[in-house]
Image: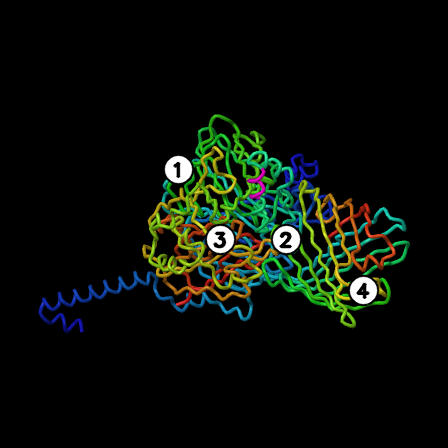
Amino acid sequence: MADALLRLHPSVLSAAFALVACAANAQQHAEHAAHVDAPAAVDRAAAFPDLGDAGHMHLEDPLNRSVVLDRFESDDADGSPVVWDLDAWVGRDLTKLWIRSDGERRNGQTEDADLEILWGKSFARWWDLLGGVREELEPGPDETWAAVGVRGTAPYRLDVEATAYVGDGGASALRVETHYEMLVTNRWILRPELDLAWYGQSDPSRGRGAGLAEGELGLRLRYEIRREIAPYVGVVLARKFGRTADRSAASGDDTRLVGGIRVSF
Amino acid sequence: MQRFPSLTRRRFIEGFATSAGAASLGRFSNAAEPPVAEPEVLRAAEVDLAIGERAANFTGRARHATVVNGSLPAPTLRWREGDTVTIRVHNELAEQTSIHWHGLVLPANMDGVPGLSFHGIAPGETFTYRFPLRQSGTYWYHSHSAFQEQLGLYGALVIEPREPEPFAYDREHVVLLSDWTDRDPLALYLLLKRHSDYFNYQKRTLGDFTRDAKRDGLSAALAERREWARMRMQPSDLADVSGAAYTYLMNGRAPAGNWTGLFRPGERVRLRFINGSSMSTFDVRIPGLQMTVVASDGQNVHPVTVDEFRIATAETFDVLVTPSGADAFTIFAQSLDRTGHARGTLAVAEGLTAPVPEMDRIVYLTVADMGHGAAASGGVDHASHAAPPVVAPPAAEHAEHAGHGAAAPASEHAAHGGGAAVEHAASEHRNPGVDMQATAPAPKLSDPGIGLRDNGRRVLTYADLHSLFADPDGREPERTIELHLTGHMERFMWSFDGIPFASAEPLALRYGERVRIRLVNDTMMSHPIHLHGMWSDLEDEAGGFLVRKHTVSMPPGTQRSYRVTADALGRWAYHCHLLFHMEAGMFREVRVDG
């Protein structure tokens, strides 16, 4: 085509050049708009190597576990008492299997012991929903409850654990435990706490009266030698209420000095 | 706060004099291999790097370190712009490894991210990297596998320019800052996931409250405490891992080891600062010397002279100093949370020291720091902003956004620093992995940052950084992608828009397009955000081109934008460069395709 053009008039030739130049210019503009050339096959191969199913490996949500022996203490009452409160879980960021236990031994006898196994799911910024079973091993014959509850951090950084229970024959109960951590220093930590228990029905055989039954107000001061090891001293005021108190052999109020160690790992 | 560290703790912070010497301790007593060495400089365009394990001792206890050619940091690589380099990486570890060339523009299959650019390097295998050097400046390289970076797999990378540089100097030193822990990094990560404030020994106490109540009055102190308690946050949350676990290193030396860079009086010295730490932000100064910043993230900037600069994880700054009037000057790099420091000396001879300054006092975050609108810094009257914006919105879509946000309570803050009313992705709402949202984020480019404001020193800010070149692309971004940095402090979950990496779709960019990425920090931590393969051209508050970077620091309460030219085909990593945040899911794949 160029040959043919050359044999034509010079003005046609210059017009042709102008056209070519214009086209080149247009192409340049187009390139500027796209800014980069279309990728060559070799570039594409380098950019998207075949990695099969291999994804980017992350330990985004690893299986984790926590064991907190929150209380392991004795008090100034007779019978060399040992009291424990264990909070443990295995699981991931938002889903955990909880194992909780508390109890008391006096005079070499386990007077009170329970074990809870709960499945937990975080459902809000600060709250987990828990459901599972509670086995009351002592006192008396074993007793099984279905449990459902929440745990989390309320505004003002109040730690809250509230669990409702349903047992044999329509028995029901509710437990609420709250505590707050006050930093005297970064290692001396003062912890006020309040635990309350209610029963739906009276059960004379177990000394339970309907309504608010038991309450415990505690104040414990611990020293974190390390985060994991913290001995503490404290004072606990325990009280039974209403019909539960009526049925109790002991008098209503019970103030104890406690000392123990908090261990986590 | 512990004001009188015990002897053991002091040794822990200050470290042992050298990393060598103590290898006869502990479980390495019978090891035939030598202890960790200091990095050599490799200048060839063809190098061999062997990744292995060695005993290192920075605290009095021998630990396993991940080393390259036996050294920690890894060898300093010095190359020349325009050359094509070949690096054979041999894996002598028992696990997969990789090397990522941080800040280098190269083909995707050379970028070194397992699962995105290649398969990683299996134990016993060798992988050959080969790519042309299309840039110059100060960069670095590090592992992108597991927690090897925390264990020591990082090194300096210097590319000398073909053209003469716009500044002159007589000698230079690399100053690579990092953090070392005796703890197993995986165990550390799991620990943070179940006890996120484990390493924070600077929480405010009753004593602090009494002091504040005396100073500000009881009701003011109470109101301030109530605000934080209501949010269930800690104003002392400045770092996830503190000096309680870290010994901070300068070129692989603990403070007591006193890394020393030599100079002759009258010389002008170029210092190439690199933050190769896993989780630490440093505030750097050299008492007695002013520093002229000439490059940021390897790219030249208009020289700016300062007394101090903050360097986020993965950033680099090149500064010029002219030491005179003394034989020794301390290079002092304190961690942002003021729990430890790295330290070295510029001196006319080995063995000289200069006084090491006391660390500054910790400054706690304020509610305004977190972009929560009320009580904003600078005493800005928010009501006045309900009127037309003071700073013109840079693009039309801002107006559109402002329209969307009109009903939101935050709309009155819309004009802050040219930003629009903040909107949060639906995925952030009712999300147990998101504990906080900013309501009035602002660019805060001229803010020196928490702990550096009004300290009597001239402190570098992002607003001081101006690239020596005009916007290299020149096109206006065709679209804006907004991403929020999200997380849950206590659960130690981290994500973009509330979606962690494993659940996220890749961010798709069209090959050749110019986009604006607008980041909003919804968390109370600072996040250094790094895009692989392409530059992040940071915009000023009016939407103009400010400075070219590879890592953009995002303090709490900020909203910052940068332009990206999607000229690099492939699958690229885009993530927070805090190692444990990245691992926890503050990571996205960016896929550039035609």
Q: Nearer the viewer, residue B401 or B155?
A: B401
Residue B386, percent from left and from top: 38, 50
* Marker disc for residue B438: 3
3 or 1: tag closer to the N-terminus = 1
Tag 2 and tag 3, C-beta contact below 8 Å: no
In three-dimensional space, the C-alpha distance between marks 2 and 4, rounded to whole angstroms, equals 34 Å
Residue B419, percent from left and from top: 40, 52
How would you rate the neighbour count of disc 1 (Cα within 10 Å): few for under 14, some for 14-19, many for 20 or more? few
Mark 1, residue position? B168
Tag 4 and tag 1, C-beta contact below 8 Å: no
- The subunit letter for the residue under badge 3 reads B
Q: Which kind of residue does numbered mark 3 sit on?
A: Ala
How would you rate the neighbour count of disc 2 (Cα within 10 Å): few for under 14, some for 14-19, many for 20 or more? many
Main secondary structure type of the part rendered in magenta: helix
Q: Which kind of residue does numbered mark 4 sit on?
A: Glu
Magenta-tinted stretch: B218-224
Q: Nearer the viewer, residue A88 or B470?
A: A88
In three-dimensional space, the C-alpha distance between marks 4 and 1, rounded to whole angstroms, equals 79 Å
Mark 2, residue position? B192
Rendered position, A107 above or below A123: above
- The subunit letter for the residue under badge 1 reads B
Tag 3 and tag 1, C-beta contact below 8 Å: no
**Element type at marker 3?**
loop
Q: Nearer the viewer, mark 2 or mark 4?
A: 4
Q: Are marks 3 and 1 on the same chain?
A: yes
Quarter of image, res B15: top right
Q: Is residue B226 visible?
A: yes
Q: Is residue B68 visible?
A: no
Mark 4, residue position? A136
Q: Are marks 4 and 3 on the same chain?
A: no
